[in-house]
Amino acid sequence: MSIVIRNGTIVNATGAYPADVLVEGERIAALAAPDSGLAEQWAAGAERVIDAAGKYVVPGGIDGHTHMEMPFGGTFSADNFETGTIAAAWGGTTTIVDFAVQGKGTSVLSALDKWHSKADGNCAIDYGFHMIISDVNDTSLKEMEACIDAGVNTFKMFMAYPGVFYATDGEILRAMQKARDTGSMIMMHAENGIAIDQLVLQALANGQTDPVQHGLTRPPELEGEATSRAIALAKVTGAPLYIVHLSAAHALDAVTQARDTGQNVFAETCPQYLFLSLEDLARPDFEGAKYVASPPLRPREHQAELWRGLRTNDLSLVSTDHCPFCFKDQKELGRGDFSKIPNGMPGVEHRMDLLYQGVVRGEITLPRWVEISSTTPARMFGLYPRKGVIAPGADADITVYDPTARQTISASTHHMNVDYSAYEGMELTGKVSTVLSRGRVVVDDNAFHGAAGHGRFLKRDLSQYLI
Ligand SMILES: [Zn+2]
């Protein structure tokens, strides 16, 4: 099976240029100058020709932070691996890295088995795993090695959620030492959960129960403090550090400083922190519950700082932290007590589109859009150059993007299994027109042509940003 994508503009992290793409089987076989004899020859012999005139041909997006079917507070996130990966494909994302969860008192490897049984055979696009370590002991530290051999070499820990995922500084230190010794990486949820829990109790005791309290009891200073502490622990241990879902200017300052001194500290942010704010959490009639995620949405002035970070590479990439809970029956668990609202927002479908608005508004360049949504995630998580680039030999994970099409985001048209959109009514410039996953056309002409089970597990190499 050969497919030729003609007349498009290829956009890689290194720049944009016109070229035709020959796809053979699951991989990109070659690129040719448009109108060259070779390109004509390919088109004549191809089983399928996709016309990309006026469109960008970009490497499929890689969302390095999703939570499909994730247990939280007595419920599960609403997308499973099938619905979530189909929604991702609709939005031009062709790889996700999801989080397996080691619960307290359970084994790391059994958690990995459990997540494989949830995902294997159900994904429409390729997928990998990170591992959440919530119980640090001699056994789990040893199991990290087996995990790395199995292609799962990034370990997330929490400075928040005491009693659930929370790790003490001593536990974090031990896990970081193991990461240093094995070339793996600790990913950190950096918020001071011990202080936050007191603020939450005080707010509830004062009868302050609305969703906005979720934001007010998790001030940005406590994200900045935890980020600085994680950076100090990483420095002491000599381990690399990856800060997940960075939301606050205070935390970005700490990351910027660490990077300026040469420390291996990386951070991601998420579209919700670039486009939404504390004002959304303050929406009346419990509407704010739709925007409850941790860290919380911040006052609007943080957004400019995050865009700055994306331009200067102090923020390496953008993931979604996709963790959808329906408004009805799930978010509603927290009516009358904001601390019981499941934490998480939907987003896997719209990351590429939302980030493209950064190009439209002049916040980032076109190649930087590709870099933060695909190329850097591929390198960060050991998938490059199989993923993250349009080049001969790479997997044919390709998104054909129409930069002039218009669309309006709505829960009535999105494909995520959740009953609201955090971006309802938002008008966007740019839209996915065709998506290939390992050489198979999975989205085209406003229809889904893929299948659950097409996606394969990706055994990842170590991060390619570490020497
Ligand atoms: Zn998360």
Image (tube, rainbow, N blue to C red):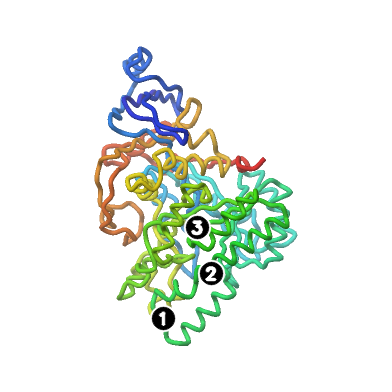
- Say which residue label 1 marks: 209
What's the distance in space between the residues labelled 2 and 3, CA to CA? 15 Å
Q: Position of residue 151 (x, y in %)?
A: 61, 43
In screen coordinates, is 439 left or right of 189?
A: left
Lower position in the chain sequence, tag 1 or tag 2: 1
Q: Secondary structure at mark 2?
A: helix
- Asked if the residue at label 1 sits under 8 Å from ligand 1, the reply is no
Query: The N terminus is located in which quarter?
Result: top left
In screen coordinates, is 142 left or right of 29?
A: right
> Callout 2 environment at 10 Å: few (<14), some (14 to 19), or many (20+)?
some
Q: Is residue 316 above or below residue 289?
A: above
Q: Using the rendered image of the protein, determine whether residue 68 is visible from the camera's viewpoint.
A: no
Q: Amino acid at mark 2?
A: Glu
* 2 vs 3, front mark: 2
Q: Secondary structure at mark 3?
A: loop
Residue drawn at point x = 43 percent, y = 66 percent: 298
Q: Nearer the viewer, residue 449 or 44?
A: 44
- Say which residue label 2 marks: 221
Q: Nearer the viewer, residue 428 or 151?
A: 428
